Amino acid sequence: MLTRRHHASESGEFLAPTYGTRFFANDLAAFRMPGNGMTPQSAYQIIHDELELDGNPSLNLASFVTTWMEPEAQKLIMENLQKNLVDQSEYPQTGLIQHRVIHMLASLFHAPQDQDVTGTSTIGSSEAILLGLLAHKKKWQNNRKKKGLPSDSPNLVVGGDVHVVWEKFCRYFDVELRTVPLTSDRFVLDVAGALSLVDENTIAVGAVLGTTFTGQVDPVVELNDALEKLFRDKGYFVPIHVDGASGGFLLPFLEPELVWDFRLSHVRSINVSGHKFGLVYPGIGWLLFRDRSDLPDDLVFRVNYLGAEEETYTLNFSSNAAFVIAQYYNLLRLGKKGYKQILENCRENARFFAGKLSESSFFTPIDPSPSLPIVAFSLRAPHAGREMEISSELRKFGWIVPAYTLPPDAQGLSVLRVVVREQVSKNMLEHLLEHLDISSQILKNPSLSVKGSPLVC
Ligand SMILES: *Cc1c(COP(=O)(O)O)cnc(C)c1O
């Protein structure tokens, strides 16, 4: 031992400055696991430095996902990172906390409290949507079988404004997707169009609060009324699954009077992303059912090999408990008033930004006074269609603002989108407006590009 230690220090491995070890001058193992490892300091520094090439999360206005949490929340996350959420008998308090959050969200979404509150945490809204729709498919199948009717051709009706995970559900779980296309001036679900696609094989209709493309809200009340009428006329009950990935945490605080949740008779399940406006780091999502009867028993697994009988309804078995705990921290720490204060700031800033864009001769927002803190905007003629170029110019300042075309039949319109997260202050948006202005000058006169580039001046 002694001699080995002596050799190591003589060869300089213990004394070498971090950037003095050979690892910084050698090829980095990229695709094959290296035979020998390296010191923790070297591994840390190499990876840390490489990740500096990533975008800056604070300037990532493309993402809905939380980029800042309070130090106390971070402390709780670090203290609980090693806990597996599925081990509820080992970590009973963590399990209890998950139940408390599910109850709080169920009550926020006005689930009938005399029924069993039923829900689960998930990795995000995607898993929650897959599981929610799977429950509707199973329930539909069970009903059809009970009545001796065929149950081999289920369909799902959605607007063209849904997130890609709805399409994923249909492919993964063999359900026919029926989409109501958008139009050149309507970017949310058309209820009459949806009703024309619904039949007795429809497992559910989707509604989105805060669409990925424009941040607008589908007309849930109108959809509910139409499905109630259909039930009265034809006798089949078609449930609504509400995709509240972003809106589920926004509307209860920003528009408490707006009805979209379990107050509506056909809304049987809701998903929300804890890691979007739930203000928790990725990945945490939630799935809520109106009551226990909306989750067929044959989808719930009971396992007892961890010590006590536990029920699970998730796609993944193991997952991290820290983000469930972080969600509970936010709910306790902020309360309804705290969420309201933060989210109202986000919306006020979004409206400030959209207002400034409306005044400009170059840009035009889809909605000059958005109801959620999401601003989609386009270029005015004659530059319409060049949104991608603005996105690239903004990237030179460090901003990440995506540009994309809307789904069919609105594909003629391309937009830029800014999600006004908690961290995006009015001051930041003023700088963004300034940089948008410079980017638009460059678009009008490309020779400015070199002179005007922040990388040069
Ligand atoms: C983000 C989002 C999703 C996917 O949610 P994840 O939490 O990222 O899995 C689904 N639907 C909508 C409307 C979204 O905004």
Image (cartoon, helix red, strand yellow):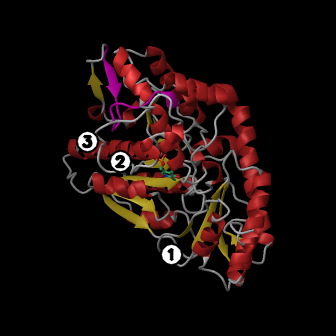
Is there any visible trace of residue 104 in the rendered image?
Answer: no
Mark 2 residue crowding within 10 angstroms, few (<14) / some (14–19) / many (20+) = few
Q: What x and y, as percent, mark residue 55?
A: 57, 54
The CA distance from mark 1 to mark 3 is 39 Å
Amino acid of disc 2: Ala
Please name the residue that numbered disc 1 is placed on: 411
Please name the residue that numbered disc 2 is placed on: 29
Question: What residue is drawn where x is 74% and y is 66%?
Answer: 435
Kind of element beneath mark 3: helix
Tell which of 59 and 426 is nearer to you: 59
Please name the residue that numbered disc 3 is placed on: 142
310 within the magenta span: yes
Q: What x and y, as percent, mark residue 308?
A: 31, 14
Mark 3 residue crowding within 10 angstroms, few (<14) / some (14–19) / many (20+) = some
Is there any visible trace of residue 408 in the rendered image?
Answer: yes
Kind of element beneath mark 1: loop
Disc number lying in front (2 or 1): 2
Q: Quadrant of the C terminus?
A: bottom right
276 within the magenta span: no
Q: Is residue 12 above or below residue 139?
A: above
Which stretch appears magenta?
308-323
- Mark before the other along the chain sequence, 1 or 3: 3
The CA distance from mark 2 to mark 1 is 43 Å
Asked where in the image residue 145 lies, by quadrant, the reply is: top left
Question: What residue is drawn where x is 42% and y is 16%?
Answer: 91
